[in-house]
C-alpha cells in the first residue's frame, strides 16, 4: 500500500503520534501533515484540506484525520472534489466506510475514543477494500451529485 497521509489538530496530537508509531510498526509509510508543536495550534480546516488535496493529487491512497470529535475534519475533507471522508468510531463503520463507500479518508475523535480502540479501527479500515457490487451504483450516484454541484 502506498503511504498513508495523516493530520491532526491540537486536540489530537497525542493520538496522532500513537497512530503514526502503530502504522510505521505495521510497515506502512506515513506522511504527517500536522504542524509541528513549535507552530501555532493547527486549525483542523487547514489540516483536513491539505490532507484531502494530497490524496486528490495522488500522493497517497488513503488518509487519516484526527481532531477532538472527528466531525469537523470529515466536513472539511468532504469539501474537496472527489474525496469521500467518513467519521469512524468503531470497527464496523470503518470497514463499511471502505467496503460500501470507498472512503479515501477516515476521521477519528481523540476526545471520543482511546488509543487502543483507535488502532483497531485504523486496522479494520486499512484491511477493507471497496467491494463494488450493489454499492457501486451508490458511489457513482455520490459522484454524480458532486459533479452536479460543481457546475456553474
Image (cartoon, rainbow, N blue to C red):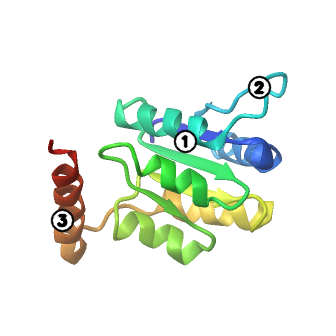
Element carrying mark 1? helix
The answer to whether one can see residue 28 in this image is no
Identify residue for label 2: 36
Element carrying mark 3? helix
Sort mark 3 into few (<14), some (14-19) or many (20+) by Cα contacts within 10 Å.
few
The x and y percentages for residue 92 are 53, 77
Tags 1 and 2 in contact by the CB under 8 Å rule?
Answer: no
Whole-number angstrom distance, CA of label 1 to CA of label 3: 24 Å
- Tally the numbered discs: 3
The x and y percentages for residue 43 are 67, 38
Q: Residue farthest to the front? A: 152
The foreground one among 146 and 19 is 146
Identify residue for label 3: 141
Query: Which numbered disc flags the more N-terminal residue, 3 or 2?
Result: 2
Whole-number angstrom distance, CA of label 1 to CA of label 2: 15 Å
The relative height of residue 119 versus residue 7 in the rendered view (above or below) is below
The foreground one among 95 and 86 is 86
User: Which quarter of the figure is the C terminus placed in?
Assistant: top left
The x and y percentages for residue 139 are 24, 64
Sort mark 2 into few (<14), some (14-19) or many (20+) by Cα contacts within 10 Å.
few
Identified at 66% across, 65% down, the residue is 120
Query: Which numbered disc flags the more N-terminal residue, 1 or 3?
Result: 1
Identified at 65% across, 45% down, the residue is 23
Identified at 78% across, 34% down, the residue is 41
Identified at 61% across, 31% down, the residue is 33
Q: Please indicate whether residue 123 sits to the left or right of residue 147 in the image.
A: right
Numbered badge on residue 48 = 1
Numbered badge on residue 70 = none
The answer to whether one can see residue 117 in this image is yes
The x and y percentages for residue 11 are 79, 49
Amino acid at each position: 500500500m502506498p503511504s498513508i497521509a495523516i493530520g491532526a489538530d491540537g486536540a489530537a496530537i497525542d493520538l496522532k503520534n500513537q497512530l503514526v508509531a502503530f502504522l510505521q510498526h505495521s510497515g506502512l509509510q506515513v506522511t504527517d501533515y500536522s504542524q509541528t508543536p513549535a507552530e501555532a495550534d493547527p486549525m483542523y480546516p487547514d489540516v483536513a484540506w491539505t490532507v484531502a488535496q494530497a490524496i486528490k493529487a495522488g500522493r497517497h491512497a488513503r488518509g487519516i484525520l484526527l481532531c477532538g470529535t472527528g466531525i469537523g475534519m470529515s466536513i472539511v475533507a468532504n469539501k474537496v472534489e472527489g474525496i469521500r471522508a467518513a467519521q469512524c468510531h468503531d470497527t464496523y463503520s470503518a470497514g463499511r466506510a471502505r467496503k460500501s463507500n470507498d472512503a479515501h479518508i477516515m476521521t477519528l475523535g481523540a476526545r471520543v475514543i482511546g488509543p487502543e480502540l483507535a488502532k483497531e479501527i485504523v486496522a479494520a479500515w486499512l484491511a477493507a477494500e471497496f467491494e463494488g457490487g450493489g454499492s457501486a451504483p451508490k458511489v457513482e450516484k455520490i459522484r454524480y451529485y458532486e459533479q452536479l454541484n460543481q457546475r456553474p
